[in-house]
């Protein structure tokens, strides 16, 4: 009988130790998760601030590009119009020369 009581006592002690170790591991895991959550929140806040800055910079670049592109496109189209007009006139003059000969 004493051996069964001894085995049961040892089993209860081992079970108690196992439960305590499991609870300690669980608590340590929860502490790590809390720290990770705080770090993620800080990182997300920093990313949000950086994205706001990037958004402002990209808006300014877009507005500058818009202001610059209209005159540039107008100048390029005027240049091509002038070149095509000169080419037409040149062809007319060459055609008139060919008709005279």
Image (spheres, grey):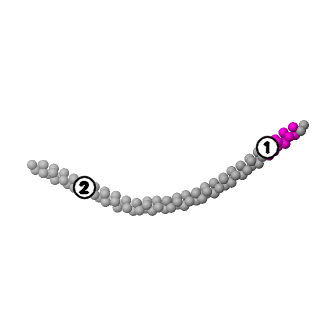
Query: What is the magenta segment's predominant secondary structure?
Result: helix
Region in magenta: 3-16
Q: Nearer the viewer, mark 1 or mark 2?
A: 1
Helix, strand or loop under label 1:
helix
| Residue shown at 74% from the left, 47% from the top | 22
The image position of residue 82, as x and y in percent, is 25, 57
Q: Is residue 1 left or right of residue 79?
A: right
| Residue shown at 45% from the left, 62% from the top | 60
Q: Is residue 73 left or right of residue 89?
A: right
Which is nearer the eye, 38 or 77?
Answer: 38
The image position of residue 94, as x and y in percent, is 15, 51
Helix, strand or loop under label 2:
helix
| Residue shown at 49% from the left, 62% from the top | 56
- In the rendered image, which residue does mark 1 sit on? 14
Which is nearer the eye, 86 or 68?
Answer: 68
The answer to if 69 sits in the magenta stretch is no
Q: CA distance from mark 1 to mark 2?
A: 96 Å
- In the rendered image, which residue does mark 2 sit on? 83
Q: Is residue 49 left or right of residue 64?
A: right
Which class describes the residues within 10 Å of circle 2: few (<14), some (14-19), or many (20+)?
Answer: few
The reply to whether discs 1 and 2 touch (Cβ–Cβ < 8 Å) is no
**Does 68 sit above or below residue 23?**
below
Q: Residue furthest right?
A: 1
Which is nearer the eye, 72 or 24?
Answer: 24
Q: Look at the image and tell me in which quarter the N terminus lies.
A: top right
């Amino acid at each position: 009988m004493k051996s069964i009581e001894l085995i049961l006592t040892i089993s209860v002690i081992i079970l108690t130790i196992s439960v305590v170790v499991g609870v300690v591991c669980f608590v340590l895991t929860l502490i790590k998760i809390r720290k990770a959550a705080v770090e993620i929140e800080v990182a997300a806040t920093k990313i949000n601030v950086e994205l706001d800055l990037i958004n402002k910079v990209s808006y300014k670049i877009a507005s500058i590009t818009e202001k610059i592109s209209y005159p540039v496109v107008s100048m390029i189209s005027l240049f091509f119009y002038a070149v095509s007009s000169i080419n037409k006139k040149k062809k007319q003059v060459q055609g008139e020369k060919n008709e005279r000969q």
